[in-house]
Amino acid sequence: MSVYSLQEVDVYCPYCGEGISVLLNPEDVGNEYIEDCEVCCRPMEFKVLDDGRGGLDAIIRSEND
């Protein structure tokens, strides 16, 4: 069982520009994965980062970037 908890982060879709809330897992820091936008359903590429203040952040790109 993990001692880490998921963190909710607000991001913007690189396609439609809509703001959405996503849950980031601290165990995914440094990893990249694809998740579809809940608004336009296009694939967003996530890279999870440690923000240096005990939280998480994500770089979001379109599949063409």
Image: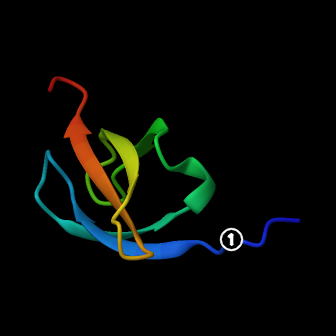
Q: Amino acid at mark 1?
A: Tyr
Q: Position of residue 63 (x, y in %)?
A: 25, 27
Q: Residue at x 57, y 61 (%)?
A: 26
Local crowd size for mark 1, using a 10 Å CA cut-off: few (<14), some (14–19), many (≥20): few
Task: Describe the colour scheme in one phrase.
Answer: rainbow
Q: Residue at x 56, y 49 (%)?
A: 28
Q: Residue at x 29, y 40 (%)?
A: 42
Q: If the image is split into quadrants, where does the N terminus sit?
A: bottom right
Task: In this rendered view, identify the residue nearer to me: 33 or 30.
Answer: 30
Q: Position of residue 36 (x, y in %)?
A: 39, 46
Q: Outermost residue toward the right?
A: 1
Against 42, is 19 above or below?
below
Q: How many marks?
A: 1
Q: Residue at x 25, y 65 (%)?
A: 11
On screen, residue 12 versus residue 20, left or right, reads: left
Residue under label 1: 4
Task: In this rendered view, identify the residue nearer to me: 40 or 13.
Answer: 13
Q: Position of residue 50 (x, y in %)?
A: 40, 59
On screen, residue 2 versus residue 9, left or right, reads: right
Against 26, is 28 above or below?
above
Q: If the image is split into quadrants, where does the C terminus sit?
A: top left
Q: Secondary structure at mark 1?
A: loop
Q: Position of residue 27 (x, y in %)?
A: 62, 54
Task: In this rendered view, identify the residue nearer to me: 19 or 5.
Answer: 5
Q: Outermost residue toward the top?
A: 64
